[in-house]
Image (spheres, helix red, strand yellow):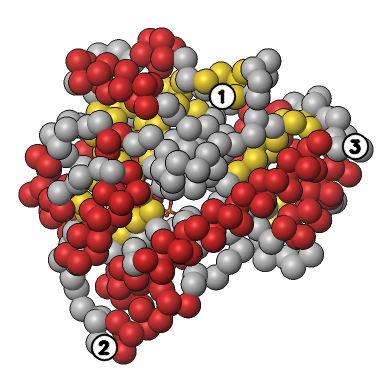
Amino acid sequence: MPPSPIRPAIAQLGPNGIGRVAMLGLGDPDIIPLWFGESDLVTPAFIREAAKLALDEGRTFYTGARGILPLREAIAAFHARTAGARIGVERITVPGAAMLAVVTALQCVVETGDNIVIVSPVWPNIFQAARMTGAEIRFARLEEEWQASPPRWRLDLSKLFNACDRRTRAIFIASPGNPTGWIMSAADQRAVLEFARARGIAIISDEVYGTLVYDGSGHAPSFLQIAEPDDAVFVINSFSKPWAMTGWRIGWLVHPATLDQQMYVMSAANNTGATTFAQYGALAALSPQGDTFRGEMLARCRTGRDVVQQFLDGQNRLRWIRPEGAFYGFLQVEGLRDSLTFASALVHGARVGVAPGSAFGPAEDKASDACVRICFAQDPERLEDGLARLGEAVRQL
Ligand SMILES: Cc1ncc(COP(=O)(O)O)c(C=O)c1O
């Protein structure tokens, strides 16, 4: 047989643990789905209306591959308003979904033979996308500090830096994190930026949950606040989460100013930009009405977080490090060793959908295999029901 032309990095791909569990019961109305990273809210009407209007006005043609200028300008204003970061439009590209922004950033910096260091636990699509480049994936796991008051996640910078070598092209960090809700401090960001500058390593900072923070600050510390326009820093953002727009597949990338020209080519080659009428919806999301909605979404997530906390207060085999941002609970189950089997059994048994902790890191990450991730951006009553089902299953474990 002649050798296969399929690249090994592609031939080796298989569904991640979240997909494997969800496949068992997707769409079944009897299952309470807490497994995916989205709220149960429909996109607000004013955003839907803006997209409908764009369609009715005949905005069905190609746009500039990097996104319509008013949208890129509104994104710049959003960063100024929420994070106090002044970003020129030449650094902003709307390639399609945030996931495509991740892929675009990866395409800029890593290829076969390189490696990328990823702070974990992390959403598996990220390292699967990184794997597709042919690069080696290395993980630097956050430390769990259960003894701290309150318990918290901590990034051990020396562990992160020691994972880097000459072939390291990028460090990937998602803060606020999925599934942890950990928020990287501004001081740690400065230390990583200095290290990366000195070593010629790019930073890919996934900030799709940047405004979903519970400390009242309005925005988690952002690399946009400290990076110079020409630093090799890529910041990912998305309309999906704060504005309940997961199905729209639209997000953006802030990239080095030096890539201004290249981004036209990359965006044209990858997708020729985001869907035109979706861009008009996104533009409406960045209006003052959109800010109001973001506030409501955050309040709803805060309620969800309180519901989980109350539930956990009554449990003796379940605990979490209460998330500082995003909308996930990474719940540790005492005695659990195989989160995939457990989460799979929950689909047909307890009829609640959770994501297995093992999906969020390498196979060696035994600590994550004792966890399940739930999304609490849900109707509080339904969330309570889902948690009660989970609690019952844990009692029987
Ligand atoms: C950390 C992180 N990055 C990126 C994405 C991708 O966002 P989108 O669905 O808007 O492409 C997600 C979605 O869950 C995420 O959790």
Q: Residues within 10 Å of mark 3 (few under 14, many from 20)?
A: few
Residue, x 44% and y 46% (percent of image)? 218
Residue 112 visible, this angle: no
Q: Marks 3 and 1: which is nearer the front?
A: 1
Indicate which disc, 2 or 3, sits on the residue closer to the N terminus.
Answer: 2
Judging depth in this view, the residue of 262 and 173 nearest the camera is: 173
What is the x, y in percent for residue 85? Answer: 25, 43
Residue 88 against residue 151 in the figure, above or below: below
Dot 2 surroundings within 10 Å: few (below 14), some, or many (20 or more)? few
Mark 3 CB within 8 Å of ligand 1: no
Q: Which residue is mark 1?
A: 153
> In the image, 279: left or right of 291?
left
Amino acid identity at mark 3 = Arg
When the figure is inspected, residue 372 is found, relative to residue 169, above or below; the finding is: below
- In the rendered image, the residue lying farthest to the front is 216
- What amino acid type is highlighted by mark number 1? Trp
Badge 3 or badge 1: first in the primary sequence: 1
Is 30 drawn above or below residue 203 in the view shown? Answer: below
Q: Which mark is residue 395?
A: 3
Crowding at mark 1 (Cα within 10 Å: few <14, some 14-19, many 20+): many
Q: Which residue is depicted at the point 45% across and 41% down?
A: 217
Circles 3 and 1, Cβ within 8 Å, touching? The answer is no
Residue 57 shows which numbered tag?
2
Query: What's the CA distance linking mark 2 and mark 3?
Result: 57 Å
Q: Residue at x 70, y 46 (%)?
A: 306
Quarter of the figure with the N terminus:
top left
Q: Amino acid at mark 2?
A: Glu
| Residue 34 shown left or right of residue 13 in the figure | right
Q: Find residue 223 and report its horizontal and vertical position in percent.
A: 30, 34
Which residue is at a point 50% across and 43% down the rendered structure image? 216
